[in-house]
Every structure is written in C-alpha cells, then in structure tokens.
Amino acid sequence: MGVSNSFTMKKRYLSSLAFVAVGLLAGHQAITNSSGAPAGSNGSPASNGNTCAQAGCHSGGPAQSSETISITTDIPASGFEAMDDYNITVTADDGGRGLTRMGFQASVEKNGNHVGALASTTNNTQTVGSYLTHTRAGISVSGGVKSWSFDWNSSNAPDSSRVYVAVNFSNANGANSGDVIVTETLLLRKDQDMSVPENRPQKVSLYPNPARQQLTVATDVPVEGPLFITDIKGATVKSVPQEARQDPHHWKISVEELSTGNYWLEMPQGPATLFRVH
C-alpha cells in the first residue's frame, strides 16, 4: 500500500513538472514573438521577400482589408545628404478594427543591400542585425493606430534607396494564426547637388512608354552600366549589362520577360525613372 501511494505521488509529481515545463515553453515562445520579429521578416529584397506570413510563424491569416501603413521622414524635399541623421516614423492604422496589438520590422536598402544605419530612439524599438523591429513595450495599440519612430544615418547611401516595412496587425488570440501582414515602401531621394558628379544626366527619356518588348533609354550625357530594373517596391528584377548600350547616350533593353506593371529604371549616375510594361 505504501509502495503504491509512493508510486502514485511520483507520477503526480512528474506530471506536474511536465505541465510546468510546457507552460514555461509556451510562455517563452509568446514572449519571444511579442519581443520583436526575427531579422529578415519585412518583405524586402534582402529578406528575399519573406515576411512573418509564413509557415511556423503568422501564416494563414486573412488578406489585407482596411489596414494601412504610412512611412514619413524629416528628409527635406531636396533629398537626404551623406553622413546625416534623419528620423523615420512608421504609422499603422487598423481601419477601425479595434485591434490591441501590432508589431513591425523595417530596413533601408538599395538593390538588396542594407544602406546607412538604423538606430532605436525609444524603448518601443530595437535593432536586430541591419533591421529595426518592435520591443515587447512597443506592441500596445491605442485607438487602432500605432506609430514607431527611429533614426537613420544615411552614411554613403545612394540615391533611390528605399525604406521597407512590414506590419503585423495582430488579433491577439495568443496563437500565430489569423493575423494580417501588410508591407509598404518609401523611396528616398538623395540631394543631387551634394552627391552626384557633374556628368549626371539632367534628362532621361524612356520610350516607348508603356513598353511591350523593348525599352530605349536616351540620356543627355554618357551613362555607364550596369543599369537595374526594379519593381514598384524596389526589388531588383533585371540587371542590364553594358552590352545593352548602343552608344554613349542610348541603351536598348529587352522587357518582354517582365509582367505587366510599373517598374523603376535605376542607373548609377542618375535618378530612378518610372516606366510601364504592358
């Protein structure tokens, strides 16, 4: 009888330990998820387009409906200057859903490379590698709107760098399901008077525009390659080699493999120029 009682007590003790262990593990996972997104989760080219909307994370959520993201900066209209500090603010609005939790991740990139340096300025944000994300203190929402502000040092970032942001509009159900992941980007222009050589093109013409099979690029000064074509969110979809240059002022680029949509043509010495493929 004594042996049986002892055996029963051991079983109950072990069961209690197992229950505590599972509870601690679940609690740790919840804290980890709410304490910042892992690096490479904001849909940027450097993230290979990955966000938290993937298997094992916040997958299977509904599509974007009323949720919106805005990105603002204090960069002047003339553009950012090299080696200067600027403030970036990301504002997420749930569109009247009344959510209580949101998280985000941001980076600044050009052609899949991180440019400049991000820095946290409040306890609501933190850096994770070359990305910036929320902290546990920075996920509470008031009135369906949440903002995060942080600094970016431009260093030697090139013209047409981009801010990439993903926001998790969480339903706060304690699970990784049912959340809406939304992405947004912002193009950053550089102060050309401060940053570009005298032979920068002042005029860039693209024709035909819209293009179907071939795009001709004409510039008022010689342009060296390679050139890059990026989609509307800044992901590089085509690298144009020097061989596409017909003469110092003209390039002929095949675009027949590109899907219908808007694209940016980017060149090392000049501005990004928008065109359309149809």
Image: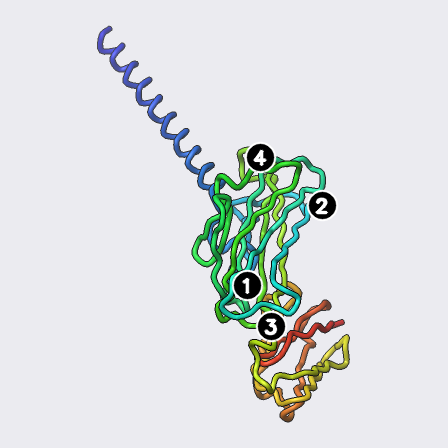
Give the Cα separation between the discs numbered 1 and 2.
24 Å
Which quadrant of the figure has residue 142?
top right
For the residue marked with disc 4, what is the amino acid? Answer: Ala
* Residue at which label 2 appears: 65
Q: Are marks 2 and 4 in contact (CB under 8 Å)?
A: no
Residue extending farthest to the bottom is 247
Viewer-nearest residue: 189 or 253: 189
Q: Is residue 70 left or right of residue 37?
A: right
Q: Are marks 2 and 3 in contact (CB under 8 Å)?
A: no
For the residue marked with disc 3, what is the amino acid? Answer: Asp
Q: Position of residue 190 (x, y in %)?
A: 59, 71
| Foreground: disc 2 or disc 3 | 3
Q: Going from the N terminus, do you reach mark 1 or mark 4 first?
A: 1
Q: Are marks 1 and 4 in contact (CB under 8 Å)?
A: no
Q: What residue appears at the point 35 percent right and 26 percent down from the top-left corner?
A: 18
Residue extending farthest to the left is 3
- Residue 160 visible within the image: yes
Q: Going from the N terminus, do you reach mark 3 or mark 1 first?
A: 1
Q: Is residue 214 left or right of residue 152?
A: right
Q: Going from the N terminus, do you reach mark 2 or mark 3 first?
A: 2
Q: Is residue 3 left or right of residue 101?
A: left
Q: Going from the N terminus, do you reach mark 2 or mark 4 first?
A: 2
For the residue marked with disc 2, what is the amino acid? Answer: Ser
* Residue at which label 4 appears: 172
Q: Is residue 75 above or below residue 120?
A: below
Give the Cα separation between the discs numbered 2 and 4.
18 Å
